[in-house]
Image (cartoon, grey):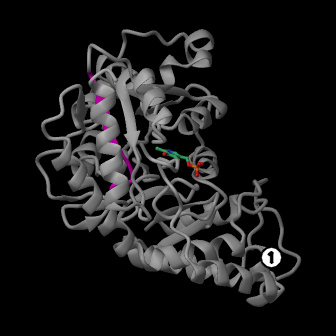
Amino acid sequence: MREEFLPFTRPDIRESDIEAVVAVLRSGWITNGPKNAEFEDELCRITGNKYAVALSSATAGMHILMKVLGIGPGDEVITPSLTWVSTVNMIVLSGATPVFAEIDRDTLMITPESVNKCITPKTKLIIPVHYAGAPFDIDGIRAAAGNIPVVDDAAHALGTFYKGRHVCADGTGIFSFHAIKNVTTAEGGAVVTDDEELAMKFRSWKFHGLGVDAFDRANRGRAPQAEVISPGFKYNLTDMQAALGLGQLKRLKEINTYRETLALRYRELLKDVSGIEPLRDPEGYDLKHAWHLFIVRVVSDKITRSEFMDKLKSRNIGSGLHFTAAHLQKFYREDMGFKRGSLPNTEFNSDRICSLPLFSGMTFQDQDDVIMGVKDVLKGN
Ligand SMILES: *Cc1c(COP(=O)(O)O)cnc(C)c1O
């Protein structure tokens, strides 16, 4: 057994990142400023979008999104139930109704067909998720959406490519830089888009609804008497965080390449292990996976998912659960009236998925320990 606990993830933070944060601390300008601007430029370079606006979290981005699109009571927003619940919470807090599209059983992503079934005259927005780092069928979903806006939940998808282009390219998407994501600023997020007006609105809404932010006022000769255009939030990223993320953005390829090596090695080493089932890559289009998560479904009749996770933990191996379906959670069942039985593929996975350790600081030896632990636990030991 391992001596030391192996977490399911750990951020990729090097000495150079620490120095970059310290340099901001010494600079006298610690909240959003030049490092935010550099961070946004680097994001645009990666995704190919014209605009990026750094935010305090992806959840903040979803909150602003509801406001700038004017989503409210009487409107419907289509999203999967198997997602991080913050998106669904933001839909509900806006006063709109979440409509859950069913997912493919083995990719965990909504499909053009499942989206089609959910569209009504009240549909105002569709938020599909690029799950675990694989891309959803962007062209298919956009075609199904017609004139309804599609905004990608790209929280797992920095470095994910669809048909040779980065996801969100020529569209709009929201990234997360929470501590567990491939690139982290501890807490953080960003919206990327080609729509200049939308980008301007995000920039204003993230900072009180002013036409300009404090950095603009101090450094870019903009009017210090900037006025509120419409009341906004306080959802900006600090420069300490932007500096932390910037180094990781610059080595994104290196980080994701190693994650891919580990993921493909998992697939190979787990190929003949019965009792767990990995996900399948979506079919029908060329893709590059960002490998944010390596998910398996516990399908053994000897052991439940929670026993599987507990037993791995007692062997000093961490794991994660991404995610429990939103419609199965207390508020959504009891207050919103969602019922088990309505989304079979979603529920099948919600009950069985488990994320195995996957991060750039992990060694092959660590991974061999995971494989040994998994095999041992599945044998009933
Ligand atoms: C992490 C995550 C979010 C939220 O990101 P935050 O930055 O923590 O707000 C949204 N959607 C998905 C699918 C996520 O994994």
Q: In this image, 350 relative to 166: left or right?
A: right
Q: Residue shown at 69%/66% (left/top)?
A: 237
| Residue range of the region highlighted in magenta in the rendering | 291-299
- Queried on whether the Cβ of the residue with tag 1 lies below 8 angstroms from ligand 1, the answer reads no
Task: Give the quadrant of the C terminus.
Answer: top left
Residue in the foreground of this view, choosing between 175 and 64: 175
Element on which disc 1 rests: helix
Residue situated in front as seen by the camera: 176 or 123: 176
Q: Is residue 25 left or right of residue 162?
A: right
Residue at image point 45% right, 60% down: 182
Residue 27, magenta (yes or no): no
Number of residues whose C-alpha sits closer than 10 Å to that of mark 1, classed few (under 14), some (14–19) or many (20 or more): some
Q: Quadrant of residue 163?
A: bottom left
**Mark 1, residue position:** 214
- Whether residue 262 is visible: yes
Indicate the quadrant where residue 308 lies.
top left
Q: Quadrant of the N terminus?
A: top left
Percent of width and height locating residue 238: 72, 70
Q: Which amino acid type corresponds to the residue marked 1 in the rendered image? A: Ala
Q: Is residue 292 shown in magenta?
A: yes
